[in-house]
């Protein structure tokens, strides 16, 4: 859902997969796993999809584009809040210095 | 279609082999064929990468499609109808003697499981929006042609697991009627959910 959110109008299989791989680095995510997840998110009403016009660079095939629905935005906000709480607890236990160092390293990596 | 490099040089854009793409398109369920085949086409870098990616992607896509087209309640009802048809046929023709043989109940489950698996694959590969009135009967009948093939294969491999011919004939006939009726009354869902277009 984060990938769809950040890709805005360009969210379809290939771009979502690339974004998910970027977000989940260093773990690899297969294209098939992305389809399965997108199907599940769509079934739950968190995202919606539509077919675009066929394009020649895809061998004349259409793209299935995805958009975040209001329910998905709410779920994403809840996930972000959970991630923040986890981050706060870890930073509290391992210290603010560690948190600063880690944030710097992460920014460099991006 | 081509990509211009340097001055005046045009190279053909990398595209998967037509045969490989045709096979992939055939294996991907029609409901998601365009997007999956298109995405694989767009990601193509080499023949090996394309084949490896297709092999890892298609089973997940088919699995997801099966999950989407399967209603758990309907699945249980169909499984029950199929198994009862064969148990009923065995009981009617042989009394308890066949059922009391070793693995008797398990042998009866083999054709039921084969029919159910074929039906689920048929649902997954059905074209969304196209539902002919005779489709439930045709789908069920086709699934039993696969069941019969599996029984012939069992006869060739290990005849102890195959069912006697008369139980197969009666069981199949009852099952086709029951499952077709169920599928006419509760047609499997074949469309994408909610706001999808």
Image (tube, rainbow, N blue to C red):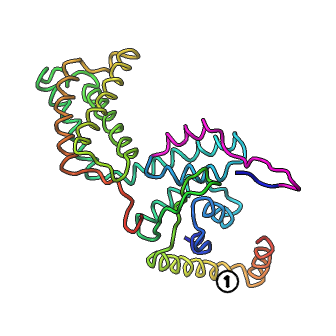
Q: Is residue B30 above or below residue B177?
A: below
Q: Which residue is drawn at 52% across and 67% down?
A: A66
Q: Which of B50 and A62 is in front in this view?
A: A62
> Measured from the top left, where is residue A56 in percent x and y?
62, 54
- Looking at the rendering, the stretch of residues picked out in magenta corresponds to B5-29
Q: In the visual, does A91 lie left or right of B34?
A: right
Chain letter behind tag 1: A
In the figure, residue B19 lies in which quadrant?
top right
Q: In this view, does A15 lie above or below B1?
A: below
The quarter of the rendered structure image containing the N terminus of chain A is bottom right
Q: Mark 1 points at which residue?
A: A92
Q: In the visual, does B19 lie left or right of A64?
A: right
Q: Residue at x 31, y 38 (%)?
A: B116
Q: In the visual, does B183 lie left or right of B116?
A: left
Q: Which residue is drawn at 61% across and 53% down?
A: A58
> Measured from the top left, where is residue B152 in percent x and y?
34, 19
Residue at the right extreme of this rendering:
B7
């Amino acid at each position: 859902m984060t990938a769809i959110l950040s890709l805005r109008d360009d969210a379809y299989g290939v771009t979502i997969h690339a974004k998910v791989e970027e977000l989940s680095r260093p773990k690899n995510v297969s294209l098939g796993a992305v389809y399965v997840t997108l199907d599940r998110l769509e079934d739950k009403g968190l995202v919606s999809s539509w077919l675009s016009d066929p394009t020649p660079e895809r061998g004349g095939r259409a793209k299935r584009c995805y958009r975040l629905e209001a329910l998905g935005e709410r779920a994403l906000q809840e996930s972000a809040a959970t991630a923040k709480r986890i981050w706060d607890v870890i930073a509290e236990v391992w210290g603010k210095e560690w948190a600063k160092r880690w944030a710097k390293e992460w920014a460099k990596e991006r | 279609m081509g990509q211009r490099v340097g001055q005046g040089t045009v190279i053909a854009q990398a595209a998967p082999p037509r045969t490989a793409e045709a096979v992939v398109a055939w294996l991907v369920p029609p409901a998601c064929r365009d997007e999956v085949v298109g995405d694989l086409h767009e990601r193509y870098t080499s023949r090996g990468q394309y084949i490896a990616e297709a092999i890892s992607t298609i089973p997940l896509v088919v699995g997801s499609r099966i999950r989407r087209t399967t209603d758990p309640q309907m699945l249980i009802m169909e499984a029950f109808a199929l198994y009862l048809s064969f148990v009923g046929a065995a009981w009617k023709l042989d009394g308890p003697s066949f059922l009391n043989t070793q693995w008797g109940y398990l042998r009866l489950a083999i054709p039921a499981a084969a029919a159910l698996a074929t039906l689920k694959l048929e649902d997954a590969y059905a074209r969304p929006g196209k539902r002919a009135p005779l489709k439930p009967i045709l789908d069920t009948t086709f699934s039993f042609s696969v069941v019969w093939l599996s029984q012939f294969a069992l006869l060739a491999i290990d005849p102890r697991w195959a069912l006697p011919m008369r139980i197969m004939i009666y069981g199949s006939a009852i099952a086709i009627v029951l499952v077709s009726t169920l599928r006419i009354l509760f047609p499997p869902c074949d469309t994408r959910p909610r706001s999808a277009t």
